[in-house]
Amino acid sequence: MAKEGLWESISEHISLTRSTIAQHCSKILTLKGFLRPGDQFKCLEDVGEGYLEDLVNRSLILVNKKGSNGKFESIGIHDLLREICIKKAKEEGFLHHVSFEMNSWKDAEPNLNRRISIHFTKSSEECRIQDSSACSLLLFSKRNWRSRLYLSCRRLIILDAPEVTWMNFSDVISLFIDLRYIAFALNHTTCPNGFPAPLYKLPNLQTIITHKNDYRPLKIPYEIFGMPKLRHLITVIPFRLSNIAKITSIHESDLQTLETVINCSFTEELIKILVNLKRLKVDFDMENDHWDDLNLNNLFQLQKLEELEITVRQHNRLMIWKHAFPVGLKKLTLQGVPLAWENMTIIGSLPNLQVLEMMYICAPEFSEWIPMEGQFLRLKYFRCSLDNVIKWEVEKEHLPSLESLILAYATFIEEIPFGIGEIDSLQLIELWFCTKSLVNSAQRIHEQQHENGNHDFQVRVFGSTEKIYAI
């Protein structure tokens, strides 16, 4: 296969064995549908993440940024290896890469252009791609550049064009019946009538990512949940589901990612559709809505949910969050949620929780927070603003697995509890715009950790100048 030959050639340049490179090559091809997941994996996404980690361990891929849950958020490749890959990919017809100013893709033979990568170097350019054999198209453009795309590649499987305006998108998208992945700019030029209804009629589409660069209200028809293979629906601007009352006609979906939906009412019918959901991001604007209308207690039924992010932008201060969360959660992010600190046992009792982020929590009054022993047993990462907390008492038994503590704008507590400094697993304390007394207490913990032999422990302080001070 040409793909094996590509990686064999790379192996000669980076002094790795041919079998090792071929193995990694076969693994990453899983994401393109060449392979199927093994018994040890539950889904293709797990396969992809595992193989990407293998490539990182072999130093073929560089990690630029990791998320709070340890997953890769941004990756790169060494310049030399990238040039080798581009050269060999072009020689073997695996990928045609070009900067738009070269305009050389027009001169390439159609049979070699199954995968095309184009970098736009100028603003307001037009790109016409007539290659009928292309199955993957990746378009890169600087933010706010309005390059225009005219596309005739009916066999496309992957289209990634988040910063490019696709002309006549709504009129022609229904012709691309083989699409599995699409990332596109959702604006008035691309989609004059809002979210394109023909999109949810594509039978093979698995991933939809929209990058919206205007601020019109976004509505998505409830029929989108009827797409037979849809696994990920991601929008930059929160959307509303329209005609949700008619949702009874749709059965269980394979959807794993849903973000970001606003003021969604989680009815029993909707929960049955979202039963396979793993990641959910939801916004609430409570100015004209009420908690009871949102059926938030039903979120508890999403047993496969691993990541949940809730943002509350406006609310009645008499509202307090008392609802249970799905027990399978590994990551929970709360912003602006009206939560009393005495109700933290709701979160602490989650058995699998590893990452907790709580910012701008609208606690109803000043209070103390003393975690209960036997809770937060697996929590590794805790980021919080400790809103209205005037007394915080922690023993190492309360957060036994904590590795990273990030405090931001914590203005009411005077020091970090001494018990946190006794946690053996602690690796990092990070402070953002906190008081001097809080910084001093972090320095004392730093000294304590080093005295105990934990020389990898770090304290980082971000002041008003946004400069990092490492202690």
Image (spheres, rainbow, N blue to C red):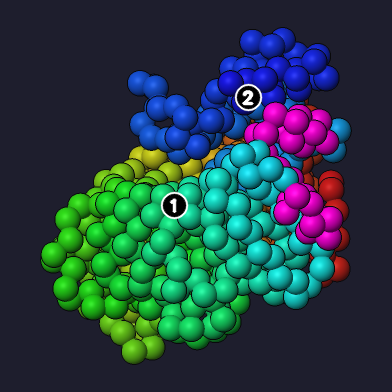
- State how far apart marks 2 and 1 are (Cα): 23 Å
Where is 401 relative to 257, above or below?
A: above
Instruction: Please tell me which residue is depicted at 13% across the width and 66% down the height of the picture.
Output: 248
Q: Residue furthest left?
A: 248
The boundaries of the magenta stretch are 83-107
Residue at (73%, 63%) from the top-left corner? 141
Mark 2: give few (<14), some (14-19) or many (20+) Cα within 10 Å.
Answer: few
Q: Is residue 209 above or below residue 365?
A: above
Q: Is residue 253 above or below residue 113?
A: below
Asked whether residue 308 is in view, the answer is no
Q: What's the residue type where badge 1 is placed? A: Leu
Mark 2 and mark 1 in contact? Answer it, CB < 8 Å: no
The outermost residue toward the bottom is: 288
In percent of width and height, residue 192 lies at 48, 83
Of the 4 image quadrants, the one containing the N terminus is top right
The residue tagged 1 is: 179
Q: Is residue 184 at all visible to an observer of this figure? A: yes
Amino acid at circle 2: Ala
Mark closer to the chain start, 2 or 1: 2
Most foreground residue, 320 or 145: 145
Residue identifier under label 2: 2
Residue drawn at x 60%, y 52% as measured from the top left:
131
Report helix, strand or loop for mark 2. helix
- From the viewer's perspective, is 413 left or right of 201? right
Q: Nearer the viewer, residue 102 or 328?
A: 102
Say whether residue 103 is magenta. Answer: yes
Q: Name the spot of residue 279 as percent of width and height, x first.
A: 41, 52
- Left or right: residue 459 versus residue 45 is right
Residue closest to the eye, 329 or 27: 27
Labels 2, 1: front one: 2
